[in-house]
Amino acid sequence: MNTQLSQPSLWQKLSDFQLDDSPEAAVQFSDKLINEQKWSPEFAKRAMAEYKKFLYLCLTMPQGASPSEVVDEVWHLHLTYTQSYWQKLCGEVLQRQLHHYPNKGGSSENQRHRDWYADTLIAYVKEFQELPPVDCWPLPKGLELESYLAPNSPFRTPTLQVTPQWEGHKYWPVGAVVIGLCALGMFMLSGPQFLLTFPLLMAWAWWGTYQKIQYKKRVMGEAARQLHPYHFAALFKDTETLFRTLVADFAERGWIRYQDEGKFGWDEQAQQPMMYSLQAQDKKELQAGLLRAFLYPFAEIMSKKSMALRNELAKDVAVGLFQWWVIMVGLARVAQGIVNGKPVIFLLLLLIIYVLVWIVLGQLPLMDNEMKKTYQSKAWEGYITAGALTFLLFDSSYSLGSNQTLQRVFDKPTKNSGGGEGGAGCSSGGDGGGGGCGGGCGGCGGCGGS
């Protein structure tokens, strides 16, 4: 997951640069963003971090960079702070003037800016080894960014090679079809005959459920060998667990550290994906809720990247259909017995037993402790720290220090603020696919002086 910025000293200067005014100021830069753009405080902080990344790209890309609408709104406001922008940022930090050139209009100019915006996103991925958050940087249609990520990046779409589910057990789906069709004739059987044959359907359904569980165990074993542990969390846990695993992993590596009163600090020198947004903050500590606002979107991106694989692995209608078919046959026979005035108590007991066994089989753990210990010691060495992996596999408590646990600090997830309902205005060119500033603003126009 390690990456090396092309100009680390430039990023250090930009991350140290203060956008917010002095603490004594009645109205901060971020406050104006919140009021003028109707953004949430969390989203405003994220937008300011993306603005600093944009400034970095302006100086590292030969032709300069093109902003998104969200980033451009931050830029517009910063330009009104003439002393901060021209003297401190351009004069002291960048040591060159950075002009804002508007789009002159016209189809050729619009296309040039669309291409420029796409090049900016590509440079973003190459430099920061992150996929840009779509609520701040809308992705143009047809633009593929994964190829610019490192081969082992957790932001890549995971792939998994597994043995087909019914390999070596092809008789089960064939038998399920045959038995299911034969069950239609069971309504012609007498009561005792039906009670003798119905358990065969139950047993076949249970056997299919057991085979399904064994298949899922094989899948988890292959996933542990082939996938990044973050993808494993996205596939077999949930986004919240993945987010907390990120926090635990970063804490174990020393990239972030828990401080008193629910605040976090971080390593300002760590050149790591997902750390740059934290380093870009004016204050060098964040409340837990704001840390969530920065890291949770990364967990969401990885979860979405894993969604196709999760859906593929979940495709298993054969066992489920047969399980419900058994219940439907049993209930239909119960109804038939009631209509004919026959006793149905024994059949109802069989159905209850069938459902209970079905539930018990569904609760069997897919990974026993021995398997977890095997993965803990071998499978993901170098990809995740031991403490974070223990938290992920065993659902154990993770201590952040100061008598605080990960679960306690993040016990009440807050809705992640984004560009949609929060009014971020992230549209970037409509059907054109995102030209940087749909309202007609250009990119930074390069980094030449005037």
Image (spheres, grey):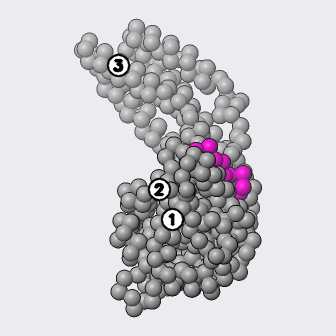
Write the start and end of the magenta stretch as one range.
Answer: 138-149
Q: Is residue 141 above or below residue 198?
A: below
Q: Is residue 259 magenta?
A: no
Quadrant the C terminus occupies = bottom right
Name the foreground residue: 362 vs 196: 362
Does residue 177 appear to the left or right of 2 in the view shown? left
> What's the residue at 38%, 34% (across, down)?
352
Instruction: Classify 10 Å Cα crowding around label 3: few (below 14), some (14-19), many (20 and above).
Output: few
Q: Quadrant of residue 391?
A: bottom right
On the image, the x and y values in percent for residue 329 come to 40, 20
Question: What distance separates the C-alpha of mark 2 from that of mark 3?
Answer: 64 Å
Instruction: Classify 10 Å Cα crowding around label 2: few (below 14), some (14-19), many (20 and above).
Output: some
Residue ID for mark 2: 439
**Marks 2 and 1 in Cβ contact (< 8 Å):** yes
- Kindly state the secondary structure of the residue where label 2 is placed: loop
Q: Is residue 145 magenta?
A: yes
Question: What distance separates the C-alpha of mark 2 from that of mark 1?
Answer: 10 Å
Sequence-wise, the earlier of marks 2 and 3 is 3
